[in-house]
Amino acid sequence: MYPSKDARELAILLRISRELDIVGDISATVDNPSEIVAWSNVLARPDIVAWRARDSGHRYLQVTADHRRAPVRGRITAVLHGEAHLRFWNALGLGELRPGDRQELTPRALSAAWSDMPLAPAETDVGEHALIDTSETSAQA
């Protein structure tokens, strides 16, 4: 996923700045479970919630923490869209979570679920971006 024009602009400004001080809330969307595990272990005293949207039923895993020192003074949130990571979602024991429901989790639970994940994702977890086995094709060539 490519960042928006505004996100690129902010990234450039941050790179050329000597110092950063943010007063307010920050939200980040992460692309895979390992990133949400990292956020849960880096942030101090995180609140971790898995929830499903009431209307669409979409799955989300959210890590949030208050931060009261530079460079960020505010609430920091990272969100993982769970639809593309159903194996991880199920490894967390969330398979029965209904639309509109939520369940609190711990960093330890996220780490345990991640450690149970296979090294190569199943095709159902990556959809159209599934890896193609070329071993037979290259052996025939």
Image (cartoon, rainbow, N blue to C red):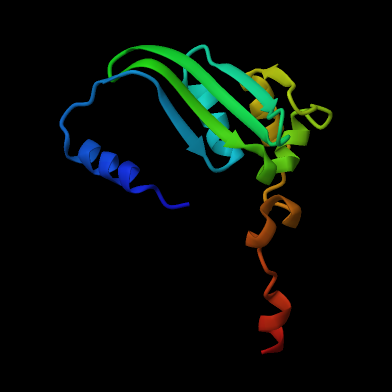
Residue 141, percent from left and from top: 66, 89
Q: Which quarter of the figure has residue 12? A: top left
> Residue at image x 28%, y 16%?
70
> Residue at image x 48%, y 52%?
1
Q: Which quarter of the figure has residue 102? A: top right
* Residue sitting nearer the eye, 96 or 131: 96
Residue 48, percent from left and from top: 60, 19
> Residue at image x 75%, y 41%?
87
Residue 107, percent from left and from top: 61, 21
Residue extending furthest bottom? 141
Q: Is residue 130 left or right of residue 7?
A: right
Instruction: Please tell me whether residue 22 is drawn above or below residue 15 in the rendered image.
Output: above
Q: Is residue 107 left or right of residue 67?
A: right
> Residue at image x 42%, y 52%?
2
Residue extending furthest right? 96
Residue 110, percent from left and from top: 65, 27
* Residue sitting nearer the eye, 28 or 133: 28
Instruction: Please tell me whether residue 133 is drawn above or below residue 108 in the rendered image.
Output: below
Residue extending furthest front? 55
Instruction: Please tell me whether residue 132 is drawn above or below residue 16 in the rendered image.
Output: below
Q: How many marks?
A: 0
Q: Which quarter of the figure has residue 109? A: top right
Instruction: Please tell me whether residue 3 is drawn above or below residue 10 in the rendered image.
Output: below
